[in-house]
């Protein structure tokens, strides 16, 4: 019988932590009609030049496949958070843009996300939080 190594235990603990954080964050963001993954899409679009990205680049940024980001964007397009945009350089490349409605929802949701993040991590002091962030980034 094999034993659980510290590395295995850490991976399992991080998985549980991710699940816990997403559930709590999604609950808070649901007041804005979005979830955490949609917030991440809106974040990347909001920081992109002209608030526009190629779908494939957006998929890479949020850790989804091309088809996964397409499935995610469909309902976002229907409720006018994002919009398709023609690529003037290459008609084969699909672009997505954060709409004015999406910008406002993102701005409002960011306040809830900040409150949720602060609440979820309130047991860590600023030094612990900085170290945890540093260690997490080292793994990415």
Image: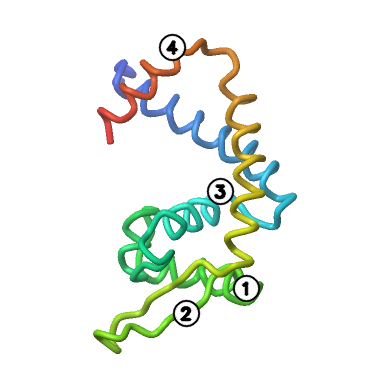
Q: Looking at the rendering, which quadrant does residue 15 occupy? A: top left
* In front: label 2 or label 3: 2
Specify the quadrant that holds the C terminus: top left
Label 4 vs 3, first from the N-terminus: 3
Q: Secondary structure at mark 4?
A: helix
Label 2 vs 4, first from the N-terminus: 2
Image location (x, y in percent) of residue 66? 35, 69
Q: Give residue 84's mark.
A: 2
Q: Is residue 91 above or below residue 98?
A: below
Q: Gap between marks 4 and 1, in whole Å?
A: 40 Å
Q: Looking at the rendering, which quadrant does residue 67 occupy? A: bottom left
Which one is nearer the viewer's eye here, 3 or 40?
A: 40
Which one is nearer the viewer's eye here, 114 or 15?
A: 114
Q: Is residue 58 above or below residue 28?
A: below
Read off the residue under disc 1: 80
Q: Secondary structure at mark 2?
A: strand
Q: Tell me if label 4 and label 3 are in contact, CB under 8 Å.
A: no
């Amino acid at each position: 019988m094999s034993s659980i190594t510290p590395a295995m235990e850490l991976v399992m603990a991080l998985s549980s932590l991710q699940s816990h954080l997403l559930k709590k964050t999604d609950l808070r963001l649901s007041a804005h009609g979005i979830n955490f993954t949609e917030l991440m899409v809106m974040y990347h679009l909001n920081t992109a030049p002209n608030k526009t990205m190629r779908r494939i680049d957006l998929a890479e940024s949020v850790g989804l496949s091309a088809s996964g980001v397409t499935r995610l964007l469909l309902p976002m397009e229907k409720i006018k958070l994002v919009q398709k945009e023609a690529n003037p350089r290459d008609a084969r490349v699909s672009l997505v843009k954060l709409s004015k409605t999406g910008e406002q929802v993102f701005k409002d949701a960011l306040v809830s996300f900040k409150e949720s993040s602060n609440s979820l991590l309130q047991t860590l002091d600023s030094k612990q939080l900085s170290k945890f962030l540093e260690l997490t980034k080292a793994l990415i």
